Amino acid sequence: MANDNINKNGYGVPSLDEDSKLADYTRQLDDLRRDGVAKVLELHQEILTVKKNKLIDQATKDKIIADHKRQIEKAKQVEAQNAPKDRELTKQAVAYANSVFAKYEKAVISVENANIEKFKADYAKQVQRINDEAAKKEAQIRSSYAGKTSANAQASLKIDIDAHRYEVKSALFDAKNTFSTAVQRAKDAKNQAFIDHVQKNIALRNGKTDFAENFIMGWKDYVYKFKLSKFFLDNGLYLAILVFFIVCIILAPLSGSGNLLTLPNIFTILEQSSTRMFYALGVAGLILQAGTDLSIGRMVALGAVITGLILHPGMNIVTFFGMGPWDFTPMAMGMRVVMALVISIVLCVAFSAFAGFFTARFKMHPFISTLATQLIIYGLLFFGTSGTPVGSIDGNIKDLLGGRWILGVINGELITFPKLIIPALIAIIVAWFIWNKTTFGKNMYAVGGNAEAASVSGISVFKTTMGVFIMAGIFYGCGSFLEAFKANASAGTGQGYELDAIAACVVGGISFNGGIGKIGGAVVGVIIFQSLTYCLTFLGIDTNLQFVFKGFIIIAAVALDSVKYLKKK
């Protein structure tokens, strides 16, 4: 039987599926689990099926479910009884499978590597043969026109030569295609061997995975699929930015600016990124829908002005549409903070939902709807406040929420940790959870990828689009509330923030073509942009030139995104 197995796969040793002893282990484990753990899973599945069955009345459902639950209890007793033997037998089976696979993998790699070398040699010979035959045929074609110098003869010669060369190119293309397919099959066989091994072990462990196996399989899969051209297409911009940062780190001490890569500098970059993170997380959802948001800067000003008015110590100097000035100091500080946060979120959500309604209901591009919202907020803020800054907020609450914790002294330097990093981290976690672990998050990707297909599959495009705009408004409201802790707010606060937020998302890999991107990309994009600004400022580069650097990064990011999109099409 062993010899039959060897003859079947062509590698000289039996595979995991062909090994008789491993098959015996599998039968023993199946017998051991049949009336225990396997029965429990089967009955749970049957209960779910019964619950969803609309043809069965509730009384019958309850009776079936109760009976299944009784059977589950019996099966669990059998499972507990067989558990020690199951563990021991599984351990033996996996160990034996590993030993069988070690021999099999070695044989597969040896045979397939030999096949690849043979394919290469055959391909080289075939190319040489095609070129030799092509040279002879071209010489024959030319000799057939020897002595014919008329214009018609020369034209015919050119046509025949071009046709012949086209045939040669086609033959070379077919040869290369055949060679590439054969090599790919050999590589597939080597990769599939390890996948089969992991899947067999998972089956032996009754569905339980192993971290080490998964890690190795992930790495092998990465190497297997790795293409240098795709790697540079996906990561070229990040590599260029990384080189830029390395150059900045080297140049900083040489220019007399000091050491750039220090803990205080890193904390400062993260602090500057903290409020910007909210705006990027908000607009990321709109970009995922193949849209954008031009109203972010005005949303920031709106929430910051409201927060500044409410948390200002003493009487405000600002009137709003002829009302005021106000003095909120008689109110408890906690109530004032909650009030400022809630009003900022409510107003930002209201304006964002306003733009979202026109986009969702009338298919208006977000560029237009958010541009209109930007102008409305801009006009209301400047008209209402006359452009007067609202002044600083109460020092105690500013230090409590927007100050720093003292960590200690390192190398003679006081190290402090910015408190604003904490709400930014919370926002990232919340956004990640929504994008990756909720039905709404899945719907976002579906609508962004193909709204018509999403609608046909039962997803409400209107509700999803409105949800994305409302979610963006919540992030803007939280960010604008915290923005007031950084500077004196006015109607001009947040100027240009929308461009930075959009650029951060694009640099982070969230595609303008819709349906592509991860929340981590927006986070990385924000940190990259803030790091870029900080590095250039640290090196004393003129502020105006910093826009040039940002412009090149944005155009490069969008160009690479477009190239990737065209390749997929």
Image: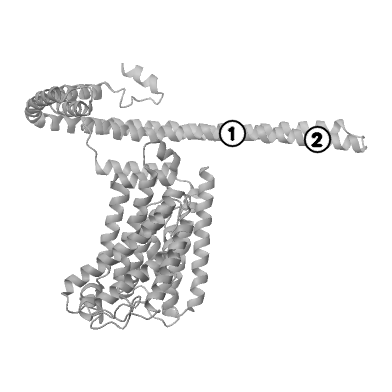
Looking at the image, residue 344 sits to the left or right of residue 515; the answer is left
The answer to whether any part of residue 119 appears in the image is: yes
x and y, in percent, of residue 257 in the image: 41, 81
How far apart marks 2 and 1 lie (CA) works out to 29 Å
Query: Callout 2: helix, strand or loop?
Result: helix
User: What residue did someone put label 2 on?
Assistant: 159
Task: Report the label total.
Answer: 2
Residue 129 in the image: above or below residue 419? above
Residue 205 in the image: above or below residue 546? above
The answer to whether any part of residue 125 appears in the image is: no
Tell me the amino acid under the disc marked 2.
Answer: Ile
Looking at the image, residue 183 sits to the left or right of residue 27; the answer is right
| Residue in the picture at 60% in, 35% down | 124
Tell me the amino acid under the disc marked 1.
Answer: Tyr
Query: Callout 1: helix, strand or loop?
Result: helix
**Which numbered mark, 2 or 1, is in the foreground of this view?**
2
Which comes before the other along the chain, label 2 or label 1?
1
Displayed quadrant of residue 536:
bottom left
x and y, in percent, of residue 516 in the image: 42, 49
Looking at the image, residue 259 sits to the left or right of residue 329; the answer is right
- Depth order, front residue of 21/56: 56
Displayed quadrant of residue 349:
bottom left
x and y, in percent, of residue 380 in the image: 40, 71
Q: In the picture, which quadrant includes the N terminus?
A: top left
Task: Point out which mark residue 123 bears.
Answer: 1
| Residue in the picture at 36% in, 21% down | 6
| Residue in the picture at 34% in, 78% down | 322
Label 2, residues with CA under 10 Å away: few <14, some 14-19, many ≥20: few
x and y, in percent, of residue 138 in the image: 78, 34
